[in-house]
Amino acid sequence: MQEDFEVTPWDVEGNVDYRKLVEKFGTKIITDELKKEMKKHAGGDHMYLRRNYFFSHRDLDRVLEDHSKDDGFFLYTGIGPSGPMHIGHIIPFYFSKWLQKKFDVNLYIQVTDDERYWTGDGTTGEIDSYAEQNIMDIAAVGLDPDRTFVFKNKEYMGNMYEAAVKISEKINFSVASSVFGFNSSTNIGMIFYPAVQMIPTFFEKKRCLIPAAIDQDTYWRAQRDIAEKLGYHKAAQIHSKFIPALTGPEGKMSSSKPRSAIMLDDSPEEVRKKVMEKAYSGGQITKEEHRKKGADLSVDVAYQWLKNLFMEDDDRLEEIGRRYNSGEMLTGEIKKILVEKLNNFLEEHRKRKEENGEELKRKMMYEGELAERMWNRKIDLDQ
């Protein structure tokens, strides 16, 4: 039976069945037992885990074992600068912040300005501009500036090239084309790129944990095939679901469709207008029918965003779900709740960016303790 959805590192189409996707990719669901273990080690839980927004993993149990034995681990994630950032882009960085703080670990953030040029997402000037904007938004998250290293591939490549040479030698075109779908029309930049994206997983001799959406899992499958041959750990991952576009539950939010996404620079009025006019509703067409039948929470975008991302209070969420599902609460009411949550989130984010974004950006890229160490070393996998 053919699936009615498609997930690749570059695109997501259709209504994703996450159970089927886990089976297809060969990952594992984060069980309640593993959540309890995570909570014990972290000294608390996180809403994204509690609500199953981060839902799948590879070797998360081994990461926790390493932590318990004081072997430690480190974090790695990234951003492809193809435009201004939206809510979906920034959420993994907030989760990375929590992981960094709770486990006291280093975080490496790769800005893939090379890949975005090869995929045709803009001129070099446009991509450079997007990269600077994106890094400013990452700075506003409030990561530890002395334990975070943000780097642009083109700028840092001189420090990484030796590692890229050794990684690329381990992956033949047959494997690359099978894993990534490359064909005779793929430019050779994209064919080489997976080796570049794998390099940060080898920045330390500890196990690497990658918080990212599950569409990026493809890269780490290839890394896991070669890591031990190079004397390193297989990369571990913790996968999030996709944040649905405002306009419907299928696919994911995209910066190429700004009207269906909440951008980080949207004004309060723009947020209100987008949510009230565009957010896909699980409610009924008429008020009378809605009072009788209630809403379908599984497809309602406002409810799903509150549940997965913005409503920390479990009791309040349960009350909203009960009232909306029964028809007591109308679509306009739940949308107003989401508008308030979104605008509060964005206001705090923008405030941090305006107050100390430039300073934090400079530290995480060049002047912080971890950044200085990384600029003073060449990544050589034989070390």
Image (cartoon, rainbow, N blue to C red):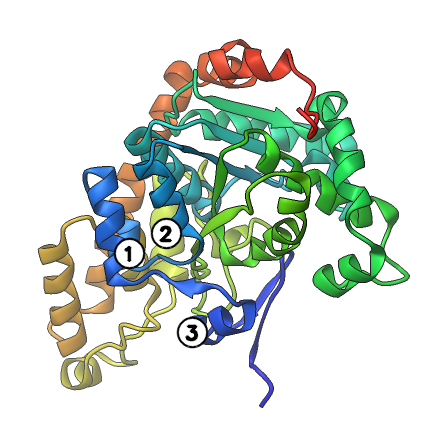
Q: Quadrant of residue 156?
A: top right
Q: Residue 61: give its label.
A: 2
Q: What's the CA distance linking mark 3 and mark 2?
A: 20 Å
Q: Position of residue 222 (x, y in %)?
A: 66, 54
**Mark earlier in primary sequence (2, 1):** 1
Decide: marks 2, 1 in contact (CB < 8 A)? yes
Q: Identify the mark at residue 360; answer none if there is no mark.
A: none
Residue 19 badge: 3
Q: What is the C-alpha distance between the residues marked 1 and 3?
A: 17 Å
Q: Earlier in the sequence, mark 3 or mark 2?
A: 3
Residue 165, by quadrant, is top right
Residue 381 is situated, as x and y percent measured from the top left of the image, at 69, 30
Residue at 22 percent of width and 61 percent of height: 334
Q: Indicate the secondary structure of the residue bearing disc 1.
A: helix
Choose mark 1 or mark 3, whichever is in front: 1
In the image, residue 52 sits, relative to residue 202, either above or below, namely below
In the rendered image, is residue 241 in sight?
A: yes
Q: In the rendered image, which quarter contains the C terminus?
A: top right
**Lateral position of residue 134 relative to residue 39, left or right:** right
